[in-house]
Amino acid sequence: MGDEEMLIELENASNWDVATRYHEFKTKPFLKKDERLRDHLRNISRDAILDRAKAILGQVVRPLKRDVAPLDQLPVDALGAELDLEATLEDAPWIGVKSVPFQVHDLLMEFQRPRQNAIILCVDTSLSMTGDKLALTAVALAVVLLQFPEDPIGIIAFENQARVLKHPTEQIGIDELLVRFLDVPAQGYTHLEAGMKSALRLVDEVPRAQLDRPPSTVLLTDGKYTAGRDPGYLGGRFPHLLVLKMGNERASRSLCRELAHKGGGQLREIENLVDLPQTMYSVVKSLLRGRDLTGT
């Protein structure tokens, strides 16, 4: 297709059509030269992806957990703080002892705070995942970050090599994340081993102090690899690994099942592309609410 024909096609394309073909368009020579047009198409793609994500997302409800802390150590995100009289009086050193002065930290407060469970998302962006697959993967990532903007979520994209799109402790807006994702080059090889190794490094980056459980990793792949070694040996190194397998190809099912089993998690197969964002959303929501997703 010539440059002129492509420009005519772009004029008649819907925003979602542009999003599904953005990785194809951006490699064309005329777009490489026209930075403004390339940015315009990327913005159209980003907005189309964001619109789909918001349509999937329901009411944002933050999972909470109960906690107790001295009055002078209440965290800034404490909700509904009330005096826990029973805990305060249980071992109060100042009761009946005049020589022991009352201190502010003697008051124990009961409160709720947002539950934090870290998740690492490791997604295939190779040529086998382009088009609708890649655009719907972007929708899935957007849904996760819209629902859980403050949780320690890390994101890896891999094809020939692995790229960190977001570190677990990094606070970035959804627009910036989608721009980073759309700028990832979709290339011919699938280095699943490199993607999983990078995901393990992000697992090690997660601060563990406020976590209820070790970080979970969600691997999104079609189960095929064309570079690197068989990554089966890496499954058992994850504290918790879930695999979302795209497509119904039987040949790659055994590897996906092996990885999920060794990682103590589940294998979920997504045969219908349009189900990907909702499936990713439900899996991550369950994990961040503390529900155990184990077994294949």
Image (spheres, rainbow, N blue to C red):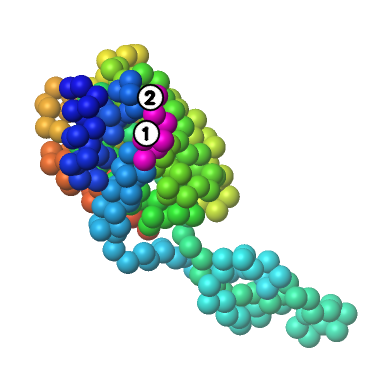
Label 2 vs 1, first from the N-terminus? 2
Residue 140 seen in the figure: no
Residue type marked 2: Lys
Residue 209's disc is none
Q: Quadrant of the C terminus?
A: top left
Out of 3 and 288, give the one closest to the viewer: 3
Q: Position of residue 194 (x, y in %)?
A: 40, 21
Q: On the picture, is 88 further left or further right than 80?
A: right
Q: What residue lies at 17% left-to-right and 22% top-to-bottom?
A: 1
Residue range of the region highlighted in magenta in the rendering: 32-40
Q: Position of residue 196 (x, y in %)?
A: 39, 27
State the residue lying farthest toward the front: 4
Quick check: 111 above or below 33?
A: below
Name the secondary structure under disc 2: helix
Q: Which residue is mark 2?
A: 32
Q: Position of residue 205 (x, y in %)?
A: 54, 37
Q: Which residue is mark 1?
A: 38
Residue 275 seen in the figure: yes
- CB under 8 Å between discs 2 and 1: yes
Out of 271 and 83, give the one closest to the viewer: 271
Magenta stretch secondary structure, dominant: helix
Q: CA distance from mark 2 to mark 1?
A: 7 Å
Q: What residue lies at 19% left-to-right and 41% top-to-bottom?
A: 13
Quick check: 221 above or below 276?
A: above
Circle 2 Cα neighbour tier, 10 Å, few/some/many (<14 / 14–19 / ≥20): few
Quick check: 124 above or below 231?
A: below
Residue 187 on the magenta span:
no
Out of 207 and 66, give the one closest to the viewer: 207
Q: Position of residue 113 (x, y in %)?
A: 51, 66
